[in-house]
Structure formats: C-alpha cells, structure tokens
Image (cartoon, grey):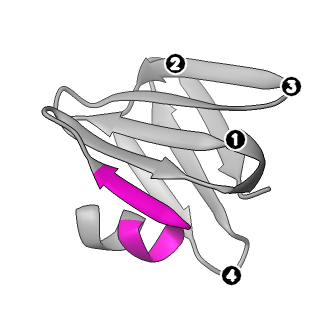
Amino acid sequence: MVATLDEFANELAKTDDGVVCEFDQGARFAVSADRTVEAGMALHDFAGGADTLVVDHDAESITVVGDGTEYTFRQP
C-alpha cells in the first residue's frame, strides 16, 4: 500500500502509525495502521474507517470503502 500511495502522492511522509500523502493547495490523504483514513482539502474533510482503498492512477483518485460509506478523494 505504501508503494502505491507513494506513486499517487506529490509527497509521501511516513508517520508513527501510517502514511500521509500531501498535494498542492494543502490537500492531504492519511492512512493509519488501524485502517483509519483522514482526508481533506480547502472545502471539505473526511474521516472514517477503510475496508478497501481503490487507487485509480488514470483518474487521479482514491476511493475509500468502509463503515457503510464510500468517499472519493481526487488530486487537486
């Protein structure tokens, strides 16, 4: 997963419990070892659990599926 997110992000930083992808304009996408996802950009934020992450490099997006929710993060 780390290698896939590294390809997706402008910058990738490892944290004590996961990784944070950083993008232009302050956008971010973080995944913790406990499968918690936190994402956001200027106009919205998302936080929730992830059963599945679907990375689409062509569409420059990651879709989070879990906790009865589906959220798609698109690179700015």
Label 2 environment density (alpha carbons within 10 Å; few <14, some 14–19, many ≥20):
some
Q: Is residue 19 left or right of residue 16?
A: right
Mark 4 or mark 3: which comes first in sequence?
3
Q: Judge whether residue 19 can be spotted in this image.
A: yes
Q: Are marks 3 and 1 in contact (CB under 8 Å)?
A: no
Tell me the amino acid under the disc marked 1.
Gly
Q: Is residue 34 left or right of residue 3?
A: left
Secondary structure type for disc 1? helix
Mark 3 or mark 1: which comes first in sequence?
1
Instruction: Check residue 75 for magenta coloring.
Output: no
Instruction: State how many labels appear.
Output: 4
The residue wearing badge 3 is 43
Q: Is residue 46 left or right of residue 5?
A: right
Q: Nearer the viewer, residue 69 or 59?
A: 59
x and y, in percent, of residue 63 in the image: 58, 48
Q: Judge whether residue 1 can be spotted in this image.
A: no
Q: Are marks 1 and 2 in contact (CB under 8 Å)?
A: no
The residue wearing badge 4 is 58
Q: Nearer the viewer, mark 1 or mark 2?
A: 1
Tell me where the magenta segment starts and ends, as one range: 6-13
Tell me the amino acid under the disc marked 2.
Ala
The residue wearing badge 1 is 26
The residue wearing badge 2 is 47
C-alpha separation, residue under disc 1 versus residue under disc 2: 16 Å
Tell me the amino acid under the disc marked 3.
Leu
C-alpha separation, residue under disc 4 versus residue under disc 1: 22 Å
| Quadrant position of residue 72 | top right
Q: Residue at x 52, y 42 (%)?
A: 29
Secondary structure type for disc 4? loop
Mark 2 or mark 4: which comes first in sequence?
2
Quadrant containing the C terminus is bottom right
